[in-house]
Image (spheres, rainbow, N blue to C red):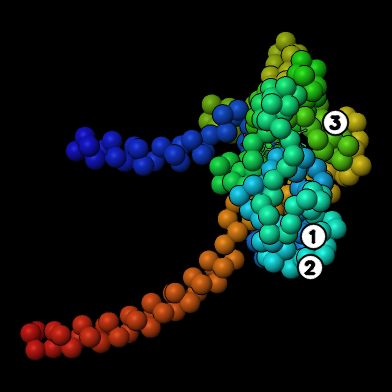
């Protein structure tokens, strides 16, 4: 029995780690769509422009992206592949040297081919939208779901700079604490101090994009990373339909055969 419980706990443990972000910040949820080619194309372009310099995608090839998103190869050459020595069939590597990266950021920026599998799409979506000003950090920014991250806010010119603002706190029953009379969220304690000084983020220096446009850009990026993490998704879903149809057909014959076997026994 004890063994059984240990097995159950061990099986469920990865779920528990997935559920917690570690920082207590609630993740925003998105529905990714591997069939939305326009979003994937935009995501690929943003990635190559803003991320590839530091984060490689070295377990995937340019070719796969071109075929899956219906991008002609000349367009890949021109707009998506900035390394002139790489060919379309090559893995998507970058030129940053590990030793240099360590010196600049304290850590080597990880390869992001499998980031969507390791972190989940909701985490990525929230991560890229929750950088905020923090003068105590080397690059002047911190992150809500990845505290003390070594990455600078590379999209700051698009999003603008966010700053902490007082946010709501949770009551003992799990809901948001509200003023019993006005029903407004309680942001300040009786002493006038914010209860949760960094519970919300507000843009204090506007960026080039509105907040909806920025969210769309991040969505496209995460959609793209989700594809990279499992490029066979479309194929898997298409084949899955045939497999289920085949099983349904097989069921008819299996049932007829079963009936035949038991005919004289019952
Ligand atoms: C100037 C270099 C640089 C650029 C450009 C950059 N990053 Fe990063 N990124 C880093 C570094 C360094 C880390 C590691 C941070 C750490 O571990 O503290 C990191 C970490 C991350 C992580 C967390 C990985 C993990 O699971 O630990 C994600 C996700 C990420 N970056 C996404 C992006 C995306 C998407 C872009 C493009 C919009 C981007 N980064 C652009 C330097 C960069």
The foreground one among 112 and 29 is 112
Quick one: label 3, few (<14), some, or many (20+) residues within 10 Å?
Answer: many
- Ligand 1, image quadrant it occupies: top right
Residue furthest to the left: 265
Q: Do the numbered discs 1 and 2 sit on residues whose CB atoms are within 8 Å?
A: yes
Total marks shown come to 3
Q: Residue at x 36, y 42 (%)?
A: 11
Identify whether 175 is placed above or below 120: above
Find residue 113 and report its horizontal and vertical position in percent: 62, 47
Q: Residue visible at 53% across and 66% down?
A: 236
**Residue 185 location (% of width, % of height):** 71, 30
Q: Mark 2 points at which residue?
A: 72
Spatial separation of the CA atoms under disc 1 and disc 2: 7 Å
- Residue 123 at x, y = what percent? 63, 40
The label nearer to you, 2 versus 3, is 2
Give the mark nearest the N terminus, 2 or 3. 2
The residue that appears at 35% across and 37% down in the rendered structure is: 10
SS at badge 3? strand
Residue 42 picture location, percent across and down: 79, 56
Q: How crowded is mark 1: few (under 14 residues within 10 Å), some or many (20 or more)?
A: some
Asked if disc 3 is less than 8 Å from ligand 1, the answer is no
Between the residue at mark 1 and the residue at mark 3, the CA separation in whole angstroms equals 32 Å
Near-viewer residue (174 or 161): 161
Residue 164 visible in the shown view = no
Residue assigned mark 3: 161
Image mark for residue 76: 1
């Amino acid at each position: 029995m004890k063994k059984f419980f240990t097995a159950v706990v061990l099986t469920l443990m990865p779920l528990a780690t997935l559920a917690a972000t570690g920082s207590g910040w609630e993740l925003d949820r998105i529905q990714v769509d591997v069939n939305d080619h326009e979003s994937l194309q935009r995501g690929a372009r943003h990635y190559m422009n803003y991320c590839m310099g530091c984060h490689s995608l070295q377990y995937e090839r340019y070719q796969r992206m071109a075929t899956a998103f219906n991008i002609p190869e000349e367009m890949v050459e021109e707009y998506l592949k900035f390394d002139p020595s790489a060919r379309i069939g090559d893995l998507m590597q970058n030129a940053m040297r590990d030793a240099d990266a360590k010196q600049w950021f304290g850590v080597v920026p990880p390869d992001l081919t499998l980031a969507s599998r390791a972190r989940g799409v909701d985490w990525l979506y929230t991560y890229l939208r929750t950088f905020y000003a923090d003068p105590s950090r080397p690059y002047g920014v911190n992150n809500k779901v990845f505290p003390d991250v070594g990455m600078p806010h590379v999209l700051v010119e698009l999003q603008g700079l966010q700053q902490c603002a007082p946010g709501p706190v949770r009551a003992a029953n799990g809901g948001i604490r509200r003023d019993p009379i006005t029903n407004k969220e309680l942001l300040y304690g009786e002493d006038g101090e914010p209860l949760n000084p960094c519970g919300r983020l507000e843009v204090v220096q506007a960026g080039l994009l509105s907040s909806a446009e920025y969210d769309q850009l991040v969505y496209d990026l995460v959609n793209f990373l989700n594809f990279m993490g499992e490029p066979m998704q479309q194929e898997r879903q298409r084949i899955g339909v045939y497999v289920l149809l085949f099983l349904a057909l097989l069921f008819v014959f299996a049932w007829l055969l079963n009936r035949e076997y038991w005919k004289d026994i019952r």
